[in-house]
Image: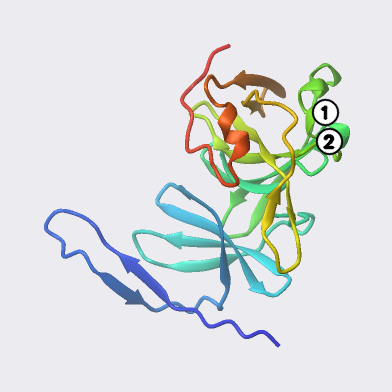
Amino acid sequence: MLTLLLEHWVFILGEGISSRWRKISSPCPPHSPLKQRLTINGRMYYLAWESLYYPVLVSFNISSEEIRLLQKPEDVFWHGYYVNLIEYAGKIAIFGHANLVKDGVMKLWVMEDEEKNIWSRKKLVLHPSQMNMVLNNNANSPYYLKVHDTTRNGEVILAPHNKFRRVIHGPIHVLPQGTTLFYVLLYNIQKNHLRRVEIEEGSNCFLNKRWAVIGLATLRT
């Protein structure tokens, strides 16, 4: 049986403030934080496991230092590659694209009321004329699409990543690349429109095991 023990510490930075780690108390149940996190309107949100197979969304109020466990939408299938936290219309949202390559379907859950745990749901279907941009990332492709936050104008950033094959008790192997052209896909949720942006001098990204898109300004094509 797995038992989670958790302590919460904050590190304060600022002029006239002694920078140091400080332990804070919280009645929040123990949980194991994951890598995905996002800060909106003075709150930091991150994904976590409350138990071995029970995912939750956690909210940390930066001002009050209150930590709360929020219930995720019941119909969210939690998959590390295909479910991501994003900001939508100034609110925390969950963007799912597990079926994007298969049938052009994406799902969006938006937190409408954090206190009452009210989520809105929206099904997004990509226009058939734009499916050619995602079909290169099908099950037989050496890549999968991963969400990297949103642009300043709210477009979801999707970038192809190498698939890995891990040998038990052995090293990670990057599958052979099928192209040297590096690009990202930008999806406008409100307009239901997908566009492709090619990155100059970015071909070597496919040769790396680990890399990330850390931000994009508004792009025009």
Q: Residue furthest front?
A: 170
Mark 1 residue element: helix
Q: Residues within 10 Å of mark 1 (few under 14, many from 20)?
A: some
Residue 89 image label: none
In the rendered image, residue 62, in percent from the top left (x then y), is placed at 37, 59
Residue at the location (64% across, 69% down)?
49
Q: Relative to residue 201, is residue 81 drawn left or right?
A: right
Badge 1 amino acid: Leu
Q: Quadrant of residue 121?
A: top right
Residue at the location (83% across, 16% down)?
129
Q: Residue furthest left?
A: 16
Tell me if residue 36 comes above or below residue 121 in the rendering.
below
Mark 2 residue element: loop
Which residue is nearer to you in this view: 34 or 57?
A: 34
Residue 135 image label: 1
Label pair 2/1, CB-CB below 8 angstroms:
yes
In the rendered image, residue 217, in percent from the top left (x then y), is placed at 46, 25
The colour scheme is: rainbow
Quarter of the image for the C terminus: give it: top right
Badge 2 amino acid: Asn
Quarter of the image for the N terminus: give it: bottom right
Residue at the location (75% across, 30% down)?
178
Q: Residues within 10 Å of mark 2 (few under 14, many from 20)?
A: some
In the rendered image, residue 113, in percent from the top left (x then y), is placed at 59, 52
Residue beneath disc 2: 138
Q: Relative to residue 122, is residue 111 drawn left or right?
A: left
Q: Quadrant of residue 150?
A: top right
In the rendered image, residue 107, in percent from the top left (x then y), is placed at 75, 41
How far apart are labels 2 and 1 at the CA level?
Answer: 6 Å
Residue at the location (55% across, 78% down)?
30
